[in-house]
Amino acid sequence: MSERDLKGYWRKNLRYLSILLTIWFTVSYGFGILLAPTLNEIKVGGFKLGFWFAQQGSIYVFVIIIFVYVYLMNKLDREFGVSEEDA
């Protein structure tokens, strides 16, 4: 892989990481802590929504983010010709 391709690969990788970690931070810290009093007025399955985000929602979102990251990285690897399928 050329130096230019390597920089492009890592630039996209860091962009993906930044976006996904921002989403996770927003859900875990924003919804679970900062917006919890407002969200607690809404109940889902008998639990206050702010409590749910703090206890379960951020974990579910993190697991979904893992799968999204794997998908995006496999796509990026194929784009730059470094996927395991190309080996």
Image (cartoon, rainbow, N blue to C red):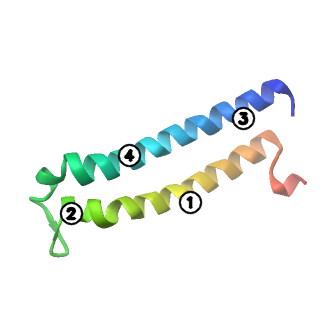
Q: Residue at x 40, y 63 (%)?
A: 59
In the image, 7 versus 71, the foreground residue is 7
Position of 62 relative to 78 (above/below): below
Distance from disc 1 to disc 4, alpha carbons, whole Å, reads 17 Å
Question: At which x and y percent is residue 20?
Answer: 49, 45
- Residue lying at the far bottom in this picture: please name it: 46
Distance from disc 4 to disc 3, alpha carbons, whole Å, reads 24 Å
Q: Indicate which disc, 3 or 2, sits on the residue closer to the N terminus.
A: 3
Q: Quadrant of residue 40?
A: bottom left
- Residue lying at the far top in this picture: please name it: 4
Q: Indicate which disc, 1 or 4, sits on the residue closer to the N terminus.
A: 4
Position of 67 relative to 34 (above/below): below
Res 36 label: none
Res 51 label: 2
Q: Indicate which disc, 4 or 3, sits on the residue closer to the N terminus.
A: 3
**Residue under numbered circle 1:** 67
- Residue lying at the far left in this picture: please name it: 41
Distance from disc 3 to disc 2, alpha carbons, whole Å, reads 39 Å
Say what secondary structure mark 1 lies in.
Answer: helix
Judge from the rendering whether residue 1 lies leftward or rightward of residue 13; answer left or right. right
- Tag 3: residue type? Tyr
Question: At which x and y percent is residue 7?
Answer: 73, 28
Q: Indicate which disc, 4 or 2, sits on the residue closer to the N terminus.
A: 4
Say what secondary structure mark 2 lies in.
Answer: helix
Q: Circle 4: is it few (<14), some (14-19), or many (20+) Cα within 10 Å?
A: some
Distance from disc 4 to disc 2, alpha carbons, whole Å, reads 16 Å
**Residue under numbered circle 4:** 25
Is the C-beta separation of discs 3 and 2 under 8 Å? no
**Residue under numbered circle 3:** 9
Q: Residue at x 16, y 55 (%)?
A: 39
Distance from disc 2 to disc 1, alpha carbons, whole Å, reads 25 Å
Is the C-beta separation of discs 1 and 3 under 8 Å? no
